Image: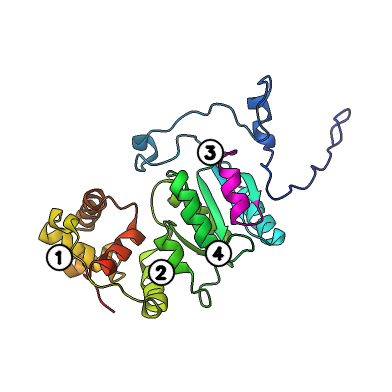
Amino acid sequence: MRRGAPARTSAAPLRAGEPRPNPRSARSSAGRPGAPAGYRGPAPTRSSAASGGPTTAPSSSVIKVMLVDDQALIRSGFRMMIEAESDIEVVAEANNGQEAFDLCAKVPCDVIVMDIRMPVLDGVEATSRILAVHHDVRIVILTTFDSDEYVFAALRAGASGFLLKDARATELIDAIRSVASGEAVVAPSATKRLLEQFIPTMEQPPAREDPRLSLLTDRERDVLIEIARGATNAEIAVRLTMAEGTVKTHINRILSKLQIRDRVGLVLFSYDVGLIKR
């Protein structure tokens, strides 16, 4: 420690259900009467062209995350991983889905990393309630995968994907950044495993004709079917004899025409309308 430098003091532990103070933004809120704890002040916006992402990317240069889990140790571990990154910050923590829903009205956030099994209000119902009010929030569901039968229901409720609780730090960070930019957390290979694991246990509704299907070209429909089967972009390119860049173009057009947010949504849509059967 430099001579004359003030000694550091340890910050009080964060209580679930409260906004998380952000020391990096202390100067941003200084002099702002009534500014809530954790307020970062106006942040420079990033355009989709500059960031390389879609227009749904958060306007702030820092991705604001809420952690929701009834186990404080799990939240602490994830928080430590996130705080090592300069472009992501934890702005709030909650013990259950109800606390998360209440906090969304007080603390703006871009991404919610949420456990699926919690007391008071579980991750499935919380996802549905939050997205019904806060349409721009992206939700990543935490799961043990092999034993959690509610993941599929959470994806249907609007979650942008899932993440294993024992995920590596790089997987967590990549997932948050991907979801914040409008992509799905579930990789194609994981989508295939998800379908094999959960779809056989779900009651498939009777196939229904959706008028949006008529908006797709034959080629786009072929690409959609391959996505629903869990194929990667590279695999689709080989199977349909097209460049991988062309596959990406088709996928963007399909998402736009069907008004679906991500790849997971395309998989669910394909099963709902009977393009893919078990």
Q: CA distance from mark 4 to mark 3?
A: 26 Å
Q: Nearer the viewer, residue 7 or 2?
A: 7
Q: Say if the magenta span includes residue 100.
A: yes
Q: Which mark is on residue 116?
A: 4
**Label 2: which residue?**
190
Q: Please state which of the two labelled residues, at mark 1 or mark 4, is closer to the viewer.
A: 4
Q: Amino acid at mark 4?
A: Ile
What percent of the width, then of the height, locates residue 218?
11, 61
Most distant residue in the right direction: 4
The quarter of the image holding the N terminus is top right
Most distant residue in the left direction: 218
What percent of the width, then of the height, locates residue 93?
65, 49
Which callout, 1 or 3, points at the residue further toward the start of the chain?
A: 3
Tell me: residue 41, above or below residue 140.
Answer: above
Q: Amino acid at mark 3?
A: Val
Q: Quadrant of residue 57?
A: top left
Q: Say if the magenta span includes residue 2.
A: no
Q: Which residues are magenta?
A: 94-107
**Label 3: which residue?**
62
* Horizontal side of residue 272 vs 56, given as left or right: left
Q: Nearer the viewer, residue 28 or 85?
A: 28
- Given contact means CB atoms under 8 Å apart, are the residues at marks 1 and 2 in contact? no
**Label 1: which residue?**
241
Q: Secondary structure at mark 4?
A: loop
Colour scheme of the rendered structure: rainbow
Q: Residues within 10 Å of mark 3 (few under 14, many from 20)?
A: some
Q: Secondary structure at mark 2?
A: helix
Q: CA distance from mark 1 to mark 4?
A: 40 Å
Q: Quadrant of residue 70?
A: bottom right
Q: Residue at x 39, y 63 (%)?
A: 187
What percent of the width, then of the height, locates residue 41?
58, 27
Which callout, 2 or 4, points at the residue further toward the start of the chain?
A: 4
